[in-house]
Amino acid sequence: MTNFIDRRLNSKNKSTVNRQRFLRRYKSQIKKSVSDAINKRGVTDVDSGESIVIPKKDLSEPIFHTGKGGIQDRIHPGNDQFSSGDRIPRPPQNQGQGGGPGDASDSGEGEDDFIFSISKDEYLNLLFEDLELPNLEKNQLDKLIEYKTVRAGFCAEGVPANIDIVKSLQGSIARRIAMTSDKRRRLKECQHKLEQLNNDTHEHVKEKRELNEEITQLKQKIAKVPFIDTFDLRFRNYTRQPVPTSKAVMFCLMDVSGSMDQATKDIAKRFYILLYLFLTRTYKTIDVIYIRHHTQAKEVDEQEFFYSQETGGTIASSALELMIKVVEERYSSSNWNIYGAQASDGDNWADDSPYCRKLLADKILPKTRYFSYIEITQRAHQTLWQQYQQLEKDNPHFAMRHIKTVDDIYPVFRDLFHKNTQEIKTTG
């Protein structure tokens, strides 16, 4: 049996194998720390790595040591206060030699919690490991096959625009060398022999004439070999390679009425960032469309979406109508995988909520792979939530959840996209 030891070093100059072993061994502790960190980070830092803390009690391993029983003699340096037989008072609880807020060790030794840095890829893998996009088994990604042109070596035939000059000249040189090598060798021999005869004092008229004739014939034969021939031409070859579609568009709809303060918008932004990062693990190309609305809807950029001070009343159907218009004009459902997420505090005109349900049921849900509605509020649910509840029963790719604080974002996100392990077992 042969054992292979991988000693390759990663960017931090640590063994890759040991790092992977550590991640596997303390996976549950690391995932818990990652889950706790997602709500403590800034909204712009989600796409970077993370320094996670693992409690020292989770890293402890069993060791053999001497018990506290029996007679032990110890020498303490600097003893000028006690004599043999004196009783030493126990130090007060939680009072160590250091001035920090941490708990002191009762054995005279202690250590801090272990801080472990993970990369962006490791962070995202742990964050989304047991999550999946719903409705992917029913609707495959390969509905539309696109083609891209790629280089495929060289060929002997083609259009003049694709001639490769370097490759053609290399072929020309190789051909001329192959066809004239023996003649050039004989030419050198004749020229050398003629030079010797010319240096000789005797006249070798006949031999010189024969050599001159042979030299002339050899030069003529060499000159007849063309500099470049059609056999030498090489053309750059191109072929069409099929590429399955992996394009997605994510619609972010948000209520910006007067009741939506900046803290509520910040919660919505964190949810949208999680959704975007999650979709990037499945799709190569993702477009993000930001639609904000009060009484009127408007397509904006990210900065205006989250930080604009424009406010007003609330008519949620205006955002849904604008989303339908954008899909019809720019994102055909046969070419794009459409996802939508709507964030609101629940306020809406009572007469408008049934119309919102109708727009979702008739025009949006039939074209989208997944649509989620999150209501960010501490109050009781309003008419919009009640109308949307009627859609949740008949549309498995529509989901709605309630978020109260920042700590609810990641648990709600995991609830929306958790893997259906029972379905996987039955279909596999």
Image (tube, rainbow, N blue to C red):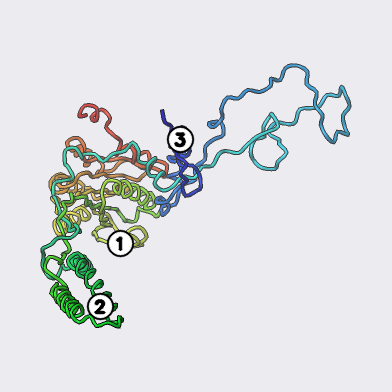
Residue at x 22% of width, y 73% of height: 187
* Residue 10 drawn above or below residue 201: above
Q: Earlier in the sequence, mark 2 or mark 1?
A: 2
- State which quarter of the image contains the C terminus: top left
Q: Classify 10 Å Cα crowding around label 2: few (below 14), some (14-19), many (20 and above).
A: many
Give the percent coordinates (x, y) of residue 184: 22, 70
Give amino acid for label 3.
Arg
* Residues at discs 1 and 3 in contact (Cβ within 8 Å): no
* Residues at discs 2 and 3 in contact (Cβ within 8 Å): no
* Residue 10 drawn above or below residue 206: above
Residue at x 25% of width, y 58% of height: 295
Give amino acid for label 1.
Asp
Q: Is residue 168 visible?
A: no
Rendered image quadrant of residue 370: top left
Q: What's the CA distance linking mark 2 and mark 1? A: 87 Å
Give whichever of 173, 278 is nearer the camera. Answer: 173
Q: What's the CA distance linking mark 1 and mark 3? A: 43 Å
Circle 3 SS class? helix
